[in-house]
Image (cartoon, helix red, strand yellow):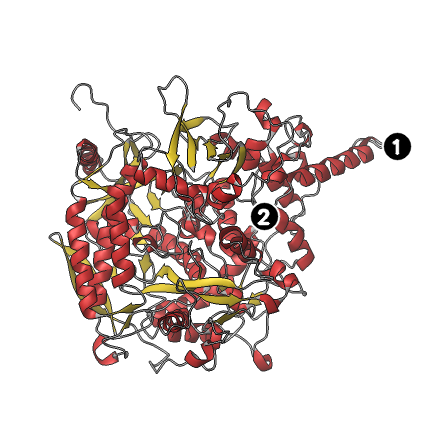
C-alpha cells in the first residue's frame, strides 16, 4: 500500500503530495506508517507525535478526509473500505487531490488551522478559544479541610466531558469553524459546559454567560461532526444544546410576564 | 554564517522549569503564586507530556475505604509498603515525607477541580494496588494522569505563566559553579534561544525510550538526566529500571495495574493462573518486579503464547464494572489489539515502564550544583529505591514539584539575574554545533543507530541481566556512540527539523544508557527491578548503597552514597 502525504513548507507556492510505499501489517497504524516513511525515505517529513496510545491528543490529522488521531487509525481498516460515514456539510474546497482508496491512505493536515509544515498545524487559535472560556475550577467559596463530596452519578456525567484530550479533531471537522474563525468551537464549549455542570462550582448562570454570544453557544449549527470525529466520544453538541436550553429558560424567566429583568 | 548577525533571542526569568508535565506544572503554580517570574520550557505542548498517560492512580492514606477487618490506613503503613517495595533502597526520610504529604496532595488537587472517582458516600474512591496492604490508590477511572494534568494546566493557564512550547533544551549554562541558564532550540523555527535564570528546575520525566519495548511516550528520551550529567551533576541508581508486567502485545501500550487491582488475573497458555507460584499471598497483586519476572519465567519455560506473551483476563469482572472502572483500558485493547476485554483476554507482555534512578537530589530537589534542581521521574531522591509501587509516581510528581518550588523560592538569590555573557556564548556554541551537524553528508543513518541502541538495551539490560552479556552491551553502546559521530541528516532546514531533534535526543540517550549500564554492571546483586542471573540474591553487606554516576573529564565515573535507613529495618521481601 502507499501513504499519500500532503507536503508543504514555507516558500512553496502550493503543497505537493508524496507517495511512500508501506508494507501492510495487521494492526499497523497511520502513525507507525508515518514513522516508517520518515525513517526510511525522507527524514524531513514533519508530523507531531507523543504518546502513540490515543491519550495525549498530539497526532490529530486529516486521514482520508476525516480528522482523527493517526495513532489509533489502522491502515487495514481504511483500505478495507473506510467504515466512517461522510461528515455532514463538510466541504474542504482547498483540498482536491484524489487518491486510490483501495491502495492508498491520504494524510493531510487538520483543516481550519494554518499549516506550518507538512502535517503540522499552528494550534494557537484553538488554544486561544480554550483560554477564552476561562477553563479553571472556581468553587466560589473557601476550600473545606477535606474533599468536597460528589456522587458517582455526578462524576459519570462530568466524565463525558473531562475525557476531552484537546486534539482539535472537532475544531477541524466543524463546518462553522470553517467559515467563522471567531467561533469558540466544540472543544472549548464542551470544556466550559464541564465546569458549568460541576456540582462543586456554585456559579449558576455566570459560567454559561461566558459564551452567550453570537460566536459562542449560538453559532453552532448542530452538524454533529464534532461528536462523530471525537476519539474520546465527547458529545459537544449535547453540551451546546443543553446550554442553549438553559439560557433560553433563564431569559424567559428574566423577561417573562411580571419579570423585572433582574 | 558571516554577514549581518542578529543577537540571539535572550529571555530572563527568575526560574526556568524544563518540562511541562505534572511536576513542572505543579512547581510553576507554586512559583507563580509566590510572585516569582518563572517560565516553563517543554519540547511538546504541556498537555502532550507523558504524565497524561498515567492510568491507575495516586496513593494516599486517606482511609476512605476500610482495610480487611475494618483496619485503618495510615502514612506509616504507606511508608512501610513503599520501603519494602523499594527492596529497602529508598531513603526512609524521603519516603516518610512523601507519605505524610500524600493525603493533603490528593485533597489539594480535588480543590483545584480534579474529578476523582467517588464512593457512594461521595468521598474520593480508593482501590487496591500491587504491593500495598490497603486499598490506598485514589483514582479517576483509569485516566488519573489525564485528569490531573488537565487540572494543573488549567491552573497554570489562569496564572498566565509563560510556556515556551516546543522548545528543546540543548544545554545548561553554569558560571562560577552555579547554574545560570540554558540554551534551547525552538523547534518550529530552528532558532537557538538563550535563557537566563537564578534557578533551573528539571522536570523532564523518564528515559524509557532508550529501550524499544517501552510503555513510555516516544518523547521520553532522558533529556533532563543527560543535561544534568553534562553540567556536572550526579545521577543516582540509574540501573534500577522498572519493567511493567502488563503492556499490550506489540505496541507495548500500558495496561494499568488497576486492571489487576479490580480483579484481573494473569493466565498462561495452559490456562493456569500462575502468580500464586511466585507470590503465594499477593498473587496477581505482587509488586511489579515480582510479576514481570514471573511472566518472563513462564514464557521462558514454554508456558507463554507464541510470540512471547501471556493473557490478562478481565472477563469475570463483568461488562458494567469494566466500563465504569477501566474504560480507557477497554478502548486501548480494542483500538490497538482488536480485543474487547469484556469478551476476550488481553495479550500482554512486560515492557520498560519507569526510571527509578535519575538526577541525584535531596528531598528539596537540590542537586550538587547551586541553582540546579530536579523533581519527578527525572530525579532520584530516592523514594522508590530499587522498585516503585504503582500509584507512587503520580504522588511523587505533585509532592516534590511543590516541595522543590518551595525550596527554590526560599533559596533564590536576591541579587539581579546573572550576567548574560555565559548564556550568550553558550548560544553561539550551540549554533556552531547545530550547523556542524547539518553540514555533514553521507555517513551513518540516524534511525539505524537509534534502533540499534534500543535493541542493545532491550537484550542486554532487560529484566534478567548477566555480567558477560552486560559487558558486551556496554561495548556495543560505546561502538554505537562512535558511529553516531558520523550520522548525517538529509533535512538541511533549520525550521521544524525533527530529524535534528531526534539526533540531539540520541546524544542524550547515549549518556543515560551508559550510566544505566555502568550502574548495572557494578551492582553484583539482585535487588528490586535489578535481577542478575549470576548474582541472584540481595547482598546488603556489599550493596546497600546508592550508585552514583558522574561525568569526569568526558568519562562516566561510578561511586556510591549511603542509603538513609530509619523506622523500618531491612528484611527479606516476601509477598
Q: Is residue B367 visible?
A: no
Chain under callout 2: A
Q: Position of residue B345 (x, y in %)?
A: 53, 64
Chain of the residue where label 1 is placed in the rendered structure = A
Which quarter of the rendered picture does the N terminus of chain A lie within? top left
Instruction: Place residue A36 in its image quadrant.
Output: top left
Q: Given this view, does label 2 or label 1 mark the residue nearer the observer?
A: 2
Q: Can residue B514 be seen at all in this image of the molecule?
A: yes
State yes or no: discs 2 and 1 in contact (Cβ < 8 Å).
no
Estimate the x, y position of residue B57 in percent, counting from the top left. 50, 61
Q: Secondary structure at mark 1?
A: loop
Q: Is residue A247 left or right of residue A95?
A: right
Pick the residue in front: B538 or B329: B329
Can you say whether B241 is above or below B401 in the image?
below
Query: Relative to B4, does residue B511 appear above or below in the rendering?
Result: below
* Residue picked out by circle 2: A162
Q: Which residue is mark 1?
A: A258
Residue found at x 24% / y 60%: B516
Amino acid at each position: 500500500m502507499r501513504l499519500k502525504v500532503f507536503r508543504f513548507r514555507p516558500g512553496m507556492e502550493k503543497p505537493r503530495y508524496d507517495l511512500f510505499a508501506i508494507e501492510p501489517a495487521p494492526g499497523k497504524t497511520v502513525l507507525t506508517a508515518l514513522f516508517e516513511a520518515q525513517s526510511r525515505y525522507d527524514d524531513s517529513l514533519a508530523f507531531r507525535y507523543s504518546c502513540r496510545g490515543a491519550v495525549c491528543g498530539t497526532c490529530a490529522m486529516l486521514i482520508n478526509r476525516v480528522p482523527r488521531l493517526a495513532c489509533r487509525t489502522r491502515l487495514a481498516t481504511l483500505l478495507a473500505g473506510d467504515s466512517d460515514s461522510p461528515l455532514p456539510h463538510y466541504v474542504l474546497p482547498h483540498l482536491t487531490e484524489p487518491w486510490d482508496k483501495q491502495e492508498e491512505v491520504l494524510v493531510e493536515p487538520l483543516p481550519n488551522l494554518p499549516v506550518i509544515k507538512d502535517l503540522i498545524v499552528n494550534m494557537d487559535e484553538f488554544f486561544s478559544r480554550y483560554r477564552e472560556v476561562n477553563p479553571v475550577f472556581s468553587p466560589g467559596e473557601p476550600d473545606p479541610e477535606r474533599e468536597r463530596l460528589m456522587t458517582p452519578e455526578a462524576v459519570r456525567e462530568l466524565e463525558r466531558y473531562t475525557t476531552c484530550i484537546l486534539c482539535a479533531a472537532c475544531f477541524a471537522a466543524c463546518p462553522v469553524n470553517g467559515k467563522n474563525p471567531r467561533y469558540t468551537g466544540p472543544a472549548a464549549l464542551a470544556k466550559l459546559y464541564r465546569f458549568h455542570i460541576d456540582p462543586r462550582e456554585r456559579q449558576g448562570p455566570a459560567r454559561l454567560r461566558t459564551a452567550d454570544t453570537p460566536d459562542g453557544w449560538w453559532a453552532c449549527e448542530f452538524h454533529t461532526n464534532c461528536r462523530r470525529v471525537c476519539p474520546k466520544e465527547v458529545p459537544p453538541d449535547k453540551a451546546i444544546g443543553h446550554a442553549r436550553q438553559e439560557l433560553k429558560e433563564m431569559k424567559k424567566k428574566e423577561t417573562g410576564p411580571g419579570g423585572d429583568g433582574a | 554564517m558571516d554577514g549581518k548577525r542578529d543577537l540571539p533571542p535572550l529571555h530572563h526569568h527568575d526560574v526556568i522549569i524544563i518540562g511541562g508535565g505534572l511536576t513542572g506544572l505543579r512547581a510553576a503554580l507554586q512559583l507563580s503564586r509566590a510572585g516569582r517570574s518563572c517560565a516553563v520550557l517543554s519540547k511538546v505542548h504541556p498537555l502532550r507530556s507523558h504524565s497524561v498517560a498515567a492510568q491507575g492512580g495516586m496513593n494516599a492514606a486517606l482511609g476512605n475505604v476500610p482495610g480487611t477487618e475494618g483496619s485503618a490506613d495510615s502514612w506509616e503503613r504507606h511508608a512501610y509498603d513503599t520501603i519494602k517495595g523499594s527492596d529497602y533502597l529508598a531513603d526512609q526520610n524521603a519516603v516518610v515525607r512523601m507519605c505524610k504529604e500524600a493525603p493533603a496532595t490528593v485533597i489539594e488537587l480535588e480543590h483545584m477541580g480534579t474529578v476523582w472517582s467517588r464512593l457512594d458516600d461521595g468521598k474520593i474512591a480508593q482501590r487496591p494496588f500491587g504491593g500495598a496492604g490497603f486499598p490506598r490508590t485514589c483514582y479517576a477511572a483509569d485516566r488519573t494522569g489525564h485528569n490531573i494534568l488537565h487540572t494543573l494546566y488549567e491552573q497554570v493557564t489562569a496564572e498566565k505563566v509563560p510556556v515556551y512550547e516546543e522548545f528543546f533544551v540543548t544545554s545548561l549554562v553554569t558560571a562560577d559553579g552555579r547554574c545560570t541558564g540554558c540554551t534551547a532550540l525552538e523547534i518550529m523555527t530552528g532558532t537557538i534561544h538563550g535563557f537566563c535564570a537564578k534557578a533551573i528546575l528539571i522536570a523532564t520525566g523518564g528515559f524509557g525510550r532508550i529501550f524499544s519495548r517501552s510503555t513510555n511516550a516516544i518523547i521520553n528520551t532522558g533529556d533532563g538526566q543527560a543535561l544534568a550529567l553534562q553540567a556536572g551533576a550526579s545521577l543516582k541508581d540509574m540501573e534500577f529500571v522498572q519493567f511493567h508486567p502488563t503492556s499490550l502485545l506489540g505496541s507495548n501500550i500500558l495496561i494499568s495495574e488497576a486492571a489487576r487491582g479490580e480483579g484481573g488475573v494473569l493466565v498462561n497458555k495452559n490456562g493456569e493462573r500462575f502468580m500464586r507460584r511466585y507470590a503465594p499471598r499477593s498473587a496477581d497483586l505482587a509488586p511489579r518486579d515480582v510479576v514481570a519476572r514471573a511472566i518472563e519465567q513462564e514464557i521462558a519455560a514454554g508456558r507463554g503464547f507464541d510470540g512471547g506473551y501471556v493473557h490478562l483476563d478481565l472477563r469475570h469482572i463483568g461488562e458494567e464494572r469494566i466500563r465504569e472502572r477501566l474504560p480507557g483500558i477497554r478502548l486501548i485493547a480494542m483500538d490497538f489489539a482488536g480485543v474487547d476485554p469484556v469478551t476476550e483476554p488481553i495479550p500482554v507482555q512486560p515492557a520498560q515502564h519507569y526510571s527509578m534512578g535519575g538526577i541525584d537530589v535531596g528531598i528539596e530537589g537540590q542537586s550538587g550544583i547551586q541553582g540546579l534542581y530536579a523533581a519527578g521521574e527525572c530525579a532520584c531522591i530516592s523514594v522508590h529505591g530499587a522498585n516503585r509501587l504503582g500509584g507512587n509516581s503520580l504522588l511523587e510528581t505533585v509532592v516534590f514539584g511543590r516541595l522543590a518550588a518551595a525550596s527554590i523560592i526560599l533559596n533564590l538569590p536576591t541579587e539581579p539575574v546573572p550576567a548574560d555573557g555565559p548564556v550568550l556564548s553558550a548560544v553561539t556554541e550551540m549554533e556552531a554545533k547545530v550547523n556542524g551537524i547539518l553540514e555533514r553528508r553521507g555517513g551513518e543513518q540516524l534511525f539505524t543507530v537509534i534502533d540499534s541502541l534500543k535493541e542493545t538495551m532491550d537484550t542486554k539490560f532487560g529484566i534478567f541481566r548477566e555480567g558477560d552479556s552486560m559487558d558486551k552491551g556496554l561495548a556495543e553502546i560505546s561502538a554505537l556512540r562512535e558511529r553516531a559521530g558520523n550520522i548525517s541528516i538529509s533535512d538541511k532546514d533549520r525550521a521544524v527539523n525533527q530529524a535534528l531533534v531526534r539526533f540531539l535526543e540520541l546524544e542524550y540517550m547515549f549518556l543515560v544508557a551508559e550510566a544505566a549500564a555502568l550502574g548495572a554492571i557494578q551492582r553484583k546483586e539482585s535487588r528490586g527491578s535489578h535481577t542478575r542471573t549470576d548474582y541472584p540474591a540481595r547482598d546488603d553487606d556489599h550493596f546497600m548503597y546508592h550508585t552514583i554516576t558522574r561525568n569526569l573529564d568526558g568519562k562516566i565515573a561510578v561511586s556510591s552514597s549511603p542509603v538513609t535507613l530509619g523506622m523500618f529495618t531491612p528484611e527479606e521481601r516476601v509477598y
